Image (cartoon, grey):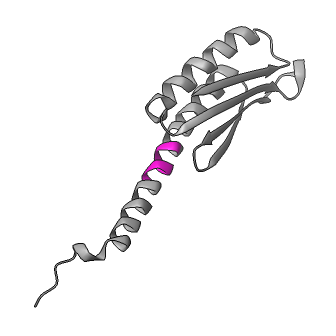
Amino acid sequence: MEVQIKARGLPAAKNLRNHASRRVRSALSRFGHVVQSVTVRLSDINGPRGGADKLCRIVIQMKNRSLVMEELGDDMRRVIDRLTERVQYNVARQMDKLARVNRQMLMIAEPELVPIKA
């Protein structure tokens, strides 16, 4: 799984990149077989004026789909933490949906497994 972290307009960007990398890898480690790449963008929308303007956007490229999620807040570390929790939950949901569809397709493709009464 390839992880890219891009930070713009943030003090202590190196520390934030390290934090984001650790959290993303931890959240998505069990989905490594499906997740191909992750791009994380960290930015301060209003610059030094302050407020709830820290934006984190995560784009996840999986084998068969993409997932884009954003979180906004006043503390970038908390924003990253909340978003990685949401990402982990949503990727798990996507995997469950995929497994359900695969099971249904398997049942449709193999109707001869149903016993026929003579």
Residue 79 vertical position relative to residue 69 in the rendered view, above or below: above
Task: Please report the residue visible at 23 percent of the width from the left and 72 percent of the height from the top.
Answer: 113
User: Does residue 26 show up magenta in the picture?
Assistant: no
Instruction: Give above or below for 87 relative to 45.
Output: below
Residue 105 is at least partly visible in this image? yes
In the picture, the quarter occupied by the C terminus is: bottom left
Question: How far across and how far down the image is residue 30, in percent?
Answer: 43, 32
Q: Nearer the viewer, residue 69 or 71?
A: 69
Indicate the quadrant where residue 70 lies.
Answer: top right
Q: In this rendering, would 102 be left or right of 61?
A: left
Residue 21 position in % (x across, y down): 61, 19
| Dominant SS type (magenta) | helix
Image x and y of residue 34, in percent: 51, 40
Q: How many marks?
A: 0
Q: What's the residue at 51%, 37% (across, down)?
A: 88
Residue 94 part of the magenta segment: yes
Instruction: Choose between 14 and 3: the one closer to the eye.
Output: 3
Q: Give the residues in magenta.
A: 91-96
Q: Is residue 33 left or right of residue 73?
A: left
Return the residue nearer the eye: 97 or 55.
97
The extreme bottom residue here reads: 118
Quadrant of the image containing the N terminus: top right
Q: Residue at x 70, y 28 (%)?
A: 40
Question: Is residue 75 visible in the rendered structure shown here?
Answer: no
How far from the left and from the top, in percent, is residue 14? 72, 9
Asked if residue 90 lies left or right of residue 66, the reply is left
Above or below residue 62? Residue 48 is: above
Nearer-the-camera pick, 99 or 84: 99
Q: Is residue 89 rendered to the left or right of residue 51?
A: left
Q: Residue at x 80, y 30 (%)?
A: 53
